[in-house]
Amino acid sequence: MVIHCERLVKIYQTAEAFRALDEVSLDVKKGDFISVMGPSGCGKSTLLNILGLLDEPTSGEYLLNGTPTARMKDRTRSHLRRDCIGFIFQSFNLMPKLSVLQNIALPMRYGNTPRGEILPRARELLQRVGLESKAENTPQELSGGQCQRVACARALANRPEIILADEPTGNLDSKSGADILALLQELNQSGMTIIMVTHDEKIAQGARRIIHMKDGKIV
């Protein structure tokens, strides 16, 4: 089991306590492609942030590849995020002043990729997402769909086992959204585990399994 979650609870202390996750249990096998759906505020992104080691649950157990993540040191969590997990965001989160090639290369400069292999691998990934002709362009010179393709390539830079995608088609037109889904399906068919948060029923249907959330629970 790549991911095992048992009775995850996340409480945010604002003016009054807000229970974002309420006893969530989830198992994810290697090679799964899961869509997580539900209304705004139901806990989808909170769950994704915990799975991506960007946040910690208030209580409950989260095992990543059999390793408990509770009380894990920050440095260990950072290394796991870097080496195990690729992130794709709705707003792309590309560096606007860097070229497309530099954006893809950036995670590798903080990882274990030998220096001489970084740019060749970045070019290989750019070719994989069909944007080899855009290597020297900046993100501002690309369409939304092209930016998300670059973000997908960047997510693959350090050869992660898992891709976490938070509304990856949310800012795209229907054709670009379908193209990104097709790319994610191709990655899944090559053996990658993917968990995708989406509001779009059509996009969600492209996954192998759909999970619905409401009021912090899986329903």
Image (tube, grey):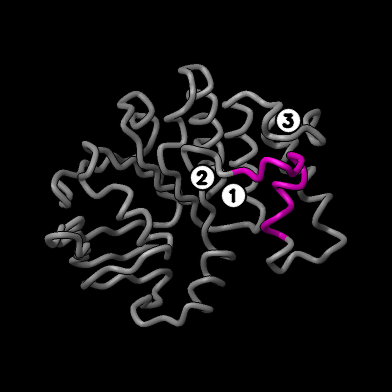
- In percent of width and height, residue 164 lies at 45, 50
Gap between marks 2 and 3 measured at Cα: 17 Å
Give the Cα distance between marks 2 and 1: 6 Å
Looking at the image, do the residues carrying marks 2 and 1 touch, with CB atoms under 8 Å apart?
yes
Write the start and end of the magenta stretch as one range.
94-108
Q: x%, y% of residue 162?
A: 49, 55
* Residue plotted at (22% across, 44% down): 41
x 68%, y 34%: residue:
139
Location of residue 21 in the rendering, given as x and y in whole percent from the top left corner:
20, 57
Judge left or right: residue 70 versus residue 184.
left
Q: Would you name the residue on which mark 1 appears?
A: 155
Location of the N terminus by quadrant is: bottom left
Q: Earlier in the sequence, mark 1 or mark 3?
A: 3
Mark 1 vs mark 3, CA separation in Å? 15 Å
Contact? badges 1 and 3 (CB < 8 Å): no
The residue that label 3 is drawn on is 131
> Marks 3 and 2: in contact by CB < 8 Å?
no
Work out whether residue 2 or residue 170 is closer to the camera in this orientation and state it. Answer: 170
Q: Position of residue 216 (x, y in %)?
A: 17, 52
Q: Tell me which label, 2 or 3, sits earlier in the chain.
A: 2
> From the viewer's perspective, is residue 219 above or below residue 111?
above
In the rendered structure, which amino acid carries the disc numbered 3?
Answer: Leu
Dividing the image into 4 quarters, which one contains the C terminus? top left
Task: Return the mark for residue 88.
Answer: 2
Instruction: Give the answer, above or below, for where 113 lies relative to 152.
Output: below
135 relative to 23 in the view: left or right: right
Q: Residue furthest right?
A: 116
Amino acid beneath label 2: Ile
